[in-house]
Image (cartoon, rainbow, N blue to C red):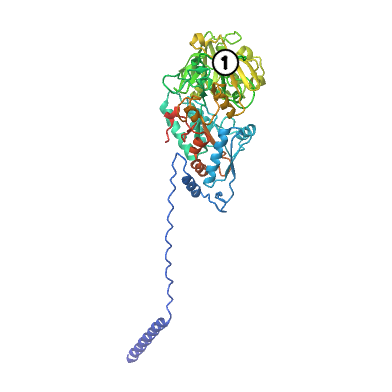
Amino acid sequence: MKKTFLWLIVISLVVVLLLAGCKSAEEAAPVEEEPPAEEAAPAEEEKPALEIPLTFSYDPDMAKAILADAGYVDTDGDGFVESPDGSKIELTVTCPFGWTDWMEAISVIAQSAQAVGINLVNETPDQSAWNDALVNGTFHSTLNNWAMLSNTPWTLYNLMFNHPIKETMGSGNFGRYENQEIFDLVDQLAATPMSDKEAIQSICEKIQTIHLTEMPMIPLWYNGAWAQYTEAAWTNWPTAEEDTPDTLPVTWNGYWQMGGLLTLTTLEPVEGVEPGTGTYPRNETLYISGAAWGPANDWNPFITWSKANTTGTCGLLYESPFMYDPLTNELTPFLAESGEWTDDSTYVMKIREGIKWTDGQTLDANDVKFTYELGKQYSAIWFSPMWNYLNEITLVDDYTLEFKFTDPLYQEWENNLYNIFIVPEHIWKNRTEEEITAGRNENPVGSGAYMYEGTGPDRNIWKRNENWWAKEALGLEVAPKYIVDILFSSNNVALGSLLKGEVDLSNNFLPGIAELVDKGYVKTYYPEAPYMVSANTAILFLNTTIKPMDDPAFRKALAFAINTDDIVNIAYAGLVAKSDPTGLMPHLSDFIMVK
């Protein structure tokens, strides 16, 4: 028992000693300390998003901020930014050579862009090369203003967002901006009845929001409806004053049916003007100008652009069913006695009785039907797309037509009512496709207030149609017996002739008008700047298929960079007004929804 007890004591001591040794060894061994935790780096503050206004105006600081925010920086110190991928940016802005006002404008555009670090230079190819590049999409940026005064915002948006995208874009969207949402909205706008103002406004707001966010093209200024006139031989010109005629005194291609013709009915000859010894008596002849490209090419109303050289073909010689007054934004019947929608897909037009062609034959509903159906027969005619939704035209009687539609595009249709000019079936029905779509149409037969008298190397002459139907039907009578339309080689030559009283009405761009108005040498529609009614919107189209024009941020920066005030004041000497960012002209202000 004692032995067992002693062994237990011994074992206990051994255990105590072992444990004590272990503890001593543990205390003697260096303690491996854990490395101190690294201090967390302070979180990088998120850069606040750049606030970019939806609309734009000249703001070079904003332009620079947008470029920097999108990664466009000057990496090589040459003063111009590079693309985010480091590639150089070398761009051009173009307009046709000889268009002096536009040449000055693109100079301002290029200088404005360079001031914010965008390498953009101005170039002026000849008109043919410029037009080829425009429709084929081989430009970087270029000016265009093909949407004239119109009773609907659809006209401008059809130019800006024309679709579908094709190899040749001859009717707009020259920068080939691809956006199905906005294409659908433009189609929806075209299909909205003109009477539904709220629906039009709603669609316009959506279009404007997308446009101003994406900025595929940049509206800059409103070109003027140039109209400078003297009282050397004719008086009673229209102006904005209440006691003068309420018409638009513009004779440029496309504007005769917008007031130009009616101006001829208000003019009065100045007493005491000697007839002179020329072929055309001065006291019976109105001398006008506006075109500056060369002699007449043709008198074909279906070839639109060439009518700049034979202005009067559409309006003096050939007439449209309706006229449009941009001063009141109203359509009025002309060749047509009336026109109305009888249901959602049926339009009935009544043609006036008693209208004669200048060869003595009767103008009736057959001629209207024939003219409209030329668009169905020949795709080269500009209004042929109308037949995508126009099904058929039925003659109700000799003076009444019924137009049947599927999903009608009301706004395009009503725009066509004053832009399609009626030709005589008995003459045109025997012509070939080439003669109709591209022929000269010499010795033209029309229904209008004037007949074509002849041409010279620098002028076209029109003689009053003494049997014009509107004298009896509408009580209208044009005052000048002759109209001589002079094609000047330059605006300066036109100005000299105007000041000498050799030209009565100039539709050329003539700088220095402010001083001439102040001194009483010429008259203008408005007595002060901008002196003229706005006629169309000058738009900078950007080629969205090339870098960096494919980047909305870059395009937006360019919009803020352009000094439009310099264009207005330097390039035009106050003769134009700055455009609303939406591009819509003042007479359509009810549809400017984004401000």
Of residues 261 and 587, which is closer to you in this image? 261
Where's residue 191, x and y in %? Answer: 48, 26
| Residue 3 on image: x %, y % | 34, 91
Residue pushed farthest bottom? 2
The residue indicated by pointer 1 is 282
- How many marks the image carries: the answer is 1
> Dot 1 lies on which element?
helix
Instruction: State the residue at coordinates (59%, 27%).
Output: 493
370 vs 20, nearest the viewer: 370
Left or right: residue 388 compared with residue 206: right
| Image position of 593 with respect to 458: above or below | below
Residue 487 image position (x, y, % from top left): 61, 24
Residue 175, can we see it? Answer: no
Q: Quadrant of the C terminus?
A: top left
Estimate how packed mark 1 is, as few (under 14), some (14 to 19) or many (20 or more) residues with alpha carbons within 10 Å: many
Residue 98 seen from this side: yes
Q: Based on the displayed image, in which of its 4 quarters is residue 90 positioned? A: top right
User: Is the residue 341 above or below the residue 14 in the image?
Assistant: above
Amino acid tagged 1 = Arg
Q: Residue 152: x, y in percent? A: 47, 26
Indicate the quadrant where residue 506 lies. Answer: top right
Q: Nearer the viewer, residue 157 or 53?
A: 53
The answer to whether 182 is drawn above or below residue 20 in the figure is above
Which quadrant is home to the N terminus?
Answer: bottom left
Q: Is residue 543 left or right of residue 37?
A: right
